[in-house]
Image (cartoon, helix red, strand yellow):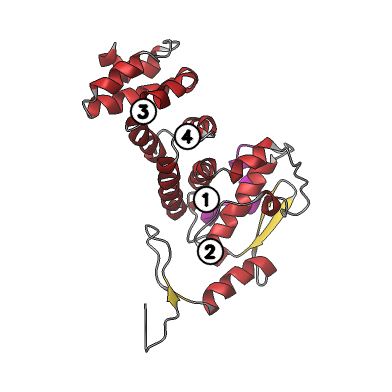
Amino acid sequence: MAQNGHHSYFNTPRGLGGIDVPCPSLKIHIENNLETAKYHDFEIKCGKELFKVHRAILCPQSGFFARSSSHLWAIRLGYGEGEDVKPIHVALTKLLIHYFYSLDYNVPSMDTLRQVNELEFETDDAGVQLLTNEVILHAWMFAVADTAEVESLKLRAAEKFHGAFRMNPQDEGIGHVIEIIYDDIPESDKRLRDIVVTVLEKQRSSVIDHCHGLFQEFPQFWTDMMAHAGDRNNGHLQSLLLNHRPPPLESEWFSGAQIWF
């Protein structure tokens, strides 16, 4: 946006509901405060890491940090007192905090991930390497945003996930993505589930066949696909999915799809 002939503003990413922010001076100043920890008044402990941050930046964006003391974050991630936090969760916390100051995030390199202080990542650390996969990263960032109650980041992560998964629905990381969506994101928020089933509906039969093992491991994934096919009157997809029907180990998971039996 130009004012008085000066083009010195940038827009926050679409879908975030943000405002125009003066650039570059204010944007650089805000991001530098994270790097230097100058004027910090809040600390977040995650594993061996201590992130020095600013309440004025975090609290308006995060319902969790607005009402919680910093030491509860690791517990919020699912770790009790004395338990070791996994490196992947420390790395995700670093990306989350960077988002608070920049309103965006990018796929990190392994070199970037190793820059988390006091943590030694092995070059073959599969958990951390997952974050270099674009589709997996966006699913994880959505899950972490849900944990931290940052709706703007959930919108951004869902937008990025949609674009990445639509470009490559046969991504080798789809197994991890389904695990994150069905194990780490509450069922009440179906945004990523809806993206997955909508994209997969348009794929070749071989792509659906490739998901056979995932349908067996995550029966709700199969149920969601079948329900979507019914909503779209897609008889071909329904017939294809019946070849991959998981065994009814528990009656609850297929109660909403009894029409298909």
Q: 261 or 161: which is nearer to us?
A: 161
Residue at disc 4, secondary structure: helix
Amino acid on which disc 3 is placed: Arg
Mark nearest the camera among 3 and 4 is 3
Q: Amino acid at mark 1?
A: Phe
**Residue at the disc numbered 2:** 102
Q: Are marks 3 and 4 in contact (CB under 8 Å)?
A: no
Q: Which residue is mark 3?
A: 204
Q: Nearer the viewer, residue 68 or 24?
A: 24
Q: Gap between marks 2 and 3, in whole Å?
A: 39 Å
Q: Amino acid at mark 4?
A: Ile
What residue is shown at x 36% (from left), y 28% (from top)? 204
Picture layout, residue 173 above or below residue 254: below
Identify the residue under disc 4. 181
Q: Which image quarter holds the N terminus?
A: bottom left
Q: Residues within 10 Å of mark 2 (few under 14, many from 20)?
A: some
**Residue 236, position in %: x, y?**
26, 21
Q: CA distance from mark 1 to mark 4?
A: 21 Å
Q: Which quarter of the rendering shows the C terminus?
A: top left
Return the residue found at the far bottom: 4
- Residue located beneath label 1 in the image: 64
**What residue appears at the point 70 percent right and 52 percent down from the top-left corner?**
111
Report helix, strand or loop for mark 3. loop
Q: Secondary structure at mark 2?
A: helix
Left/right placement of residue 118 relative to residue 28 reads right
Residue 117 visible at all? yes
- Distance in Å between CA atoms under marks 3 and 4: 22 Å
Q: Position of residue 83 (x, y in %)?
A: 72, 36
Residue 191 on the magenta segment: no
In the image, 138 versus 53, the foreground residue is 138
Residue 73 drawn above or below residue 216: below
